[in-house]
Amino acid sequence: MTWLITGGAGYIGAHVVRAMLDAGERAVVLDDLSTGIAERVPEGVPLVVGSTLDEALLGRLMRDRGVTGVVHLAAKKQVGESVDLPLHYYRENVEGLRTLLSAVTDAGVASFVFSSSAAVYGMPDVDLVTEETPCVPMSPYGETKLAGEWLVRATGRATGLSTASLRYFNVAGAATPELADTGVFNLVPMVFEKLTEGAPPRVFGADYPTPDGTCVRDYIHVVDLAEAHVATARRLREAPGTDLTLNIGRGEGVSVREMIDRINALTGHTLPPSVVDRRPGDPARVVASADRIASELGWKARYDVEDMIASAWAGWTRNHPAK
Ligand code: WQD
């Protein structure tokens, strides 16, 4: 089976490509290289540089490469930026998906895996977020992911396309230093950046209704996340007509303060964090119930927070050598 992996030159996409190859699948990557890096695509995997908005290109690509399944990761993913540029986010994330689905159904592709996000839940008021927890996204980014899920499901029902939407929680870590996240938009790299500058890491608010007052999240190693895609792809192939929505997390809440303490311990830094104002729009606690994916696919995360921090740090020090 040949999988088209959109966004396969990105941080998460490149891990998915490797996991698919390791599982014996064939892969072809489509990436516009707006944030992706060509060198992340392994040798032997064709990289087509282009956009999911280009329907003619998509049609050619599916035909010429004999694509039988798609894993669609290509998207814009910065929550704050989506507030300032909603039209851009809807175009890239919703119109890009609609165009891709149109090409997919025209080409008779059988399986479609969609990268969704815990951002669809907004500010969930529950201890563990299940796939049945109401979706009330708080940003245009989250809205585009929820609209994307609807589009994917409706297309599956109308055409028989086998579909899955995977709701990623907080992704961290790297398989190898070269594949590490180069963006500095999330807690782990933002803390690394401060430590590298010799400055204290920042805690965005310590007056939340959580045990230590800082926000609690569910961190998931990108290698585990990539393996969840392989398990999903296998299911879609084996069971035509599948319509799955799955959380991908570990079911373990870790606070910002705990993350910073563990980062300090693992990297040998001692600077205590400084508490600054809350970042607008941050929910106090977002932790997955990972029960459905375990029962549906037998998938369970293998790596813990220490593995995520250590592998992310190896990537960070490679990309930011000490001067
Ligand atoms: C985690 C916690 C911050 C930096 C976002 C998206 C989500 C998903 C993952 C794509 C928060 C706090 C951060 C710092 C801090 N993306 N923080 N100091 O906001 O949970 O999730 O990325 O799908 O949709 O919303 O992740 O890593 O930005 O923040 O205190 O220097 O760390 O306030 O509580 P978030 P994050």
Image (cartoon, rainbow, N blue to C red):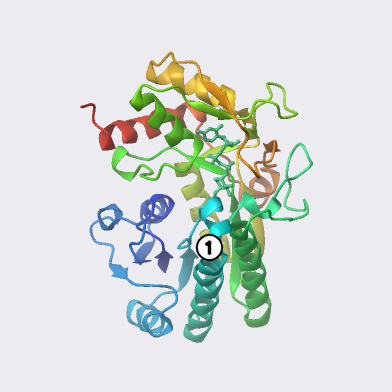
Label 1 sits on what residue type?
Answer: Leu
Is 273 above or below relative to 64? above
Q: Residue at x 67, y 38 (%)?
A: 287
Residue 289, visible in the rendered structure: yes
On-image quarter of the C terminus:
top left
Residue at 79% across, 42% down? 125
- Which quarter of the figure has residue 7? bottom left
Residue displayed at 69% across by 24% down: 213
* Relative vertical location of residue 321 with respect to residue 77 in this rendering, above or below: above
Question: Can residue 239 be seen from the camera position used here?
Answer: no
- Which of these two is toward me, 122 or 65? 122
The secondary element bearing badge 1 is classed as: loop
- Residue 147 is drawn in which quadrant? bottom right
Q: Is residue 49 left or right of residue 188?
A: left
Q: Quadrant of the N terminus?
A: bottom left
Work out which residue is located at the far left of the displayed protein and give it.
Answer: 323
Is 222 on the left or on the right of 149, as rendered? Answer: left
Q: Nearer the viewer, residue 26 or 258?
A: 258
**Mark 1, residue position:** 85
Residue 69 location, x and y as percent?
A: 47, 70
From the viewer's perspective, is 2 left or right of 234? Answer: left
User: Which of the two residues, 166 or 230, is positioned nearer the viewer here?
Assistant: 166
Q: Is residue 20 above or below residue 239?
A: above
Sort mark 1 into few (<14), some (14-19) or many (20+) by Cα contacts within 10 Å. few
Task: Ligand 1: give its quadrant.
Answer: top right
Asked if ligand 1 lies within 8 A of label 1, the reply is no
State the image coordinates of residue 320 (x, y, percent, origin top left): 27, 34
Q: Where is residue 317? Give x, y as percent.
A: 29, 31
Where is residue 104 shown, x and y percent of the image?
Answer: 50, 79
> Which of 318/248 is in front?
318
Q: Compared with residue 246, is residue 6 higher up or lower down, i.e. above or below?
A: below
